[in-house]
Amino acid sequence: EQTRANRGSKEASQRERRSRIEGRGRDDSPSKLDLLFYVEEARTARRGRRVRKGAAGSLLRMTELFGGAVLCSGIPSSWRDVSQIRQCPDHQEVFQGCVEETGGVLLVFEVLQHQSEVEDESAGAFFLSDLADSNRAEESSVVSGRVIKSLDDAVDVKDALPSLRIPDGSSGVACISRGRQKVAQGKDGRNEARWIDIHMCVLRLRCVETDFVISLSVPLGDESSAALDSHEIFSEILRGFKIIDWNLF
């Protein structure tokens, strides 16, 4: 059986503004729910400079990821960079949106080794299951999913990923899915379990042997309003996502 450590390894070189990505897999990472509900003292200055207004009325900032190799203009300006709060794995960029010191939504960008044995139609369920294992979820399910079969076709990607451009002669696939997981909150999962809404996009970039995973985790309170807001926020994140330097991979 394949392990998460095997699935998560990824390295890339860094020159000038390039980042070094030492993908260590989820077994070497802190639990995403630990990141969500366990906060330490902030230690560095906040990133992100340019701000615009999103469709939902929230202010969105242009944010550099992985040393500027990736840009995203869809992250709400009020969300904090978790690397300012605690150490994050080198293959991840993590942001937290919350009102209090604990709780709130969690946005994660991950550079992972491409899983060639996983079919595109199954990739959404595969990575949602992987996240459920990482979160030690008591229950999990896939709510919906769709596959954009060609990232070099402007017609297919104009609504979901209009800013993403791939190198000439290359191909890629986007798997966009939604799931739910019942996860114990708090550090080490000692509090009562609650449902988490998960939005996920897996960019299958075979040309650089990479699965780039974007996930948004939203603890559910008022289920109907939370689901609507999280869908709009995730859509803004995908619309503002672009890869600037493919040498990242």
Image (cartoon, helix red, strand yellow):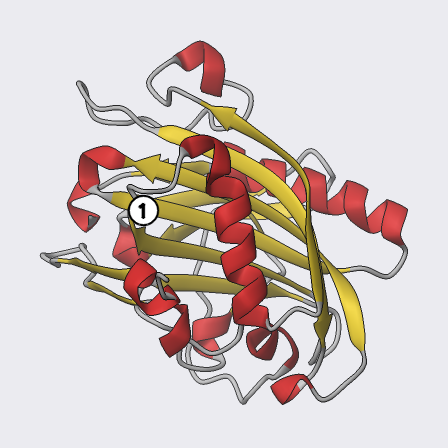
Camera sees residue 168: yes
The vertical placement of 164 against 195, above or below, is above
Q: Residue furthest top?
A: 155
Pick the quarter of the image with the N terminus: bottom left
Residue drawn at point x = 41 percent, y = 79 percent? 44
Q: How many marks?
A: 1
Residue drawn at point x = 38 percent, y = 65 percent? 4
Residue wearing tag 1: 115
Does residue 218 appear left or right of residue 92 in this picture? right
The vertical placement of 56 against 99, above or below, is above
- Helix, strand or loop for disc 1: loop
Does residue 48 appear left or right of residue 166 in this picture? right
Residue drawn at point x = 38 percent, y = 19 percent? 150
Residue 136 picture location, percent across and down:
60, 73
Residue 211 picture location, percent across and down:
34, 45
The vertical placement of 88 against 68, above or below, is below
Residue drawn at point x = 27 percent, y = 58 percent? 67
Q: Residue furthest front?
A: 1
Q: Looking at the picture, which amino acid does disc 1 mark? A: Gln
User: Label 1 neighbourhood size at 10 Å, few (<14), some (14-19), many (20+)?
Assistant: some
Q: Nearer the viewer, residue 91 or 54?
A: 91
Q: Quadrant location of residue 190?
A: bottom right
Does residue 106 appear left or right of residue 90 in this picture? right
The vertical placement of 163 against 141, above or below, is above
Residue 165 picture location, percent across and down:
32, 26
Camera sees residue 80: no
Q: Nearer the viewer, residue 41 or 135?
A: 135
Q: Nearer the viewer, residue 120 or 214?
A: 120
Does residue 9 appear left or right of residue 132 in this picture? left
